[in-house]
Amino acid sequence: MNSRELTFKERLYIIEVFKGLWLTSKHFFGNLKKHLARQLGLNRLERGAVTFQYPEERRPFSPRYRSRHRLTMRDDGSPRCVACMMCETACPARCIYIVAGEHPDPNIEKFPVRFDIDLGVCVFCGFCVEACPEDAIRMDTGIVEIAAYSRKEMIYHIEDLLQ
Amino acid sequence: MTSLAIEVAKVLVVLIGVLNLAAILTWMERKQSAVMQDRIGANRASILGFRAFGLFQVLADSIKMFVKEDFIPPLGNRFLHTLAPFLSAFFALIGFAAIPFGNTIRLFGRDISLQVVDLNVGVLYIFAAMSLGIYGVVLAGWSSNNNYAFLGGMRGSSQMFSYEITIGATILGVLMIFESMSLQTIVQAQGALLWGVIPKWGVVLQPVGCLLFLVAGVAETKRVPFDLPEGESEIIGYFVEYSSMKFGLFMLTDFVETVLISALITTLFFGGWQVPYLMDDGFHFPGGFEISLSGILVSVLQVTSYCVKVFFFCWFLLLVRWTLPRFRYDQLMRLGWKMVFPLSILNLLVTSLVILLMH
């Protein structure tokens, strides 16, 4: 790191203190004016704060944001997944567990009997989405509040993921 | 009987006023820091969906403080551990007794001095109270039987000693100019005009003293940038073993001390309850322009002016607290002993030389 010698003016400290106070009070009065104008209904466009009031007001996500997984469906409502185990293999956290079953349609080899993701272990890297050859798993639900009272409840089954 | 009732009323007005201002300061600190940092700040506490800009947060906080478990460390000294927060708050609060918040008013044929007690050694009394405040800090640190608390207490006491000397030295300059130790007399003397134009406030006559007093005053309140006794990120400080309302009392003491320092700066350097050019019978502007006002209105203006000034300095101290980063402990001591203290002595020397030459 480059550090330079402080000049005499800076080492006096007091001038820099007043410069700092000037800066913060400028923010204070500027924001106070905007807050007041908003409260009185004079100017609703300018906001005095950058805060998002979270539960009521949400930040828009980037389209590339990786949120909770979902399994995409075919037109008849069955999962697109063919239980090829690519995602399970790619998963660095080993949080995906698939049990494959024989599919009645001869054009589709297999389908998942079980498809569990342990979200308590998942690192949200998105490798499963990249590995999938069938576009059967995506991370675009926009759900980020994933919480539960026990570790068991953190395991999402195929029914939850198909929603 | 009536005079006793008046005295009690004055005590209650000052006590309740100061405690309420200290409580409001906790809200103000959160809101002001938020506005300074482009945030919104506490606004969730509500009564029946009515939020009042988060003002109920103060109420919610105090209820929380009262119902929490009050823990006394088993190896600590039970008696002293309980005593310390009360000492702290007590000595911070009694200082206000000597500070005048208005001139003597005539009401229903009685002269009422708007001050709890007009001590002729008011300045000494306040500094005695402030010095005794150290006991709260030291006892809290010592009786907790915790190394960090002990370290915080030691830091607190050495910091307060160092800066109290500076406060004493800067005050001497003011005392020499106004030739009195009674705060009421000092404030009354500040009503005079310098060359008929400038109000003879302490800050005009003692600008360096005022600045040094401000620095030492902030150090006395033990808040950022001088919050080494607390040192939230390293030792938590002398009240690390306190919970519940006993911790609340320490926090309250911090705010009461902020109010006390603001009141002292106002009284000693910014004319106390004086309004510029306002005499007992109305405004007398330098150009010969006059507005006559009734006695009661003048008193109301004076008390309002005092409150506004104190409030402004509370705001300013919060501004300082949310602007400056903390000192390192050796920097704190260097600032105290090698810069602020010698400057205050120099200020004293120059002041006495000027007074000597003028006589």
Image (tube, coloured by chain):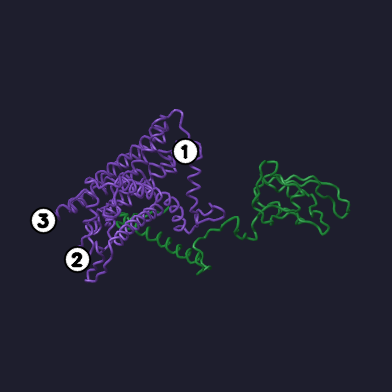
Give the purple chain's letter. Answer: B
* Crowdedness near tag 1: few (<14), some (14–19) or many (≥20) residues, C-alpha within 10 Å: some
CA distance separating discs 3 and 2 = 20 Å
Residue A13 picture location, percent across and down: 32, 54
Chain letter of the residue beneath label 1 in the structure image? B
- The residue closer to the viewer here, A141 or B13, is B13
Residue B254 picture location, percent across and down: 38, 45
Amino acid at dot 3: His
Residue B346 in view in this figure: no
Residue B161 picture location, percent across and down: 29, 41
| Quarter in which the N terminus of chain B is drawn | top left
Q: Which residue is mark 2?
A: B196
Question: Which is nearer the N-term, disc 3 or disc 2?
Answer: 2
Badges 3 and 1, same chain? yes
Amino acid at dot 1: Ser
CA distance separating discs 3 and 1 = 57 Å
Question: Which is nearer the N-term, disc 3 or disc 1?
Answer: 1
Q: Element under label 1?
A: loop
Amino acid at dot 2: Gly
B111 to the left or right of B36: left
Badges 3 and 2, same chain? yes
Q: Which mark is residue B359?
A: 3
B355 to the left or right of B125: left
Q: Element under label 3?
A: loop
Question: Which is nearer the N-term, disc 1 or disc 2?
Answer: 2
CA distance separating discs 1 and 2 = 56 Å
Q: Which residue is mark 1?
A: B243
Give the green chain's letter. Answer: A
Chain letter of the residue beneath label 2 in the structure image? B
B136 to the left or right of B166: right
- The residue closer to the viewer here, A77 or B216, is B216
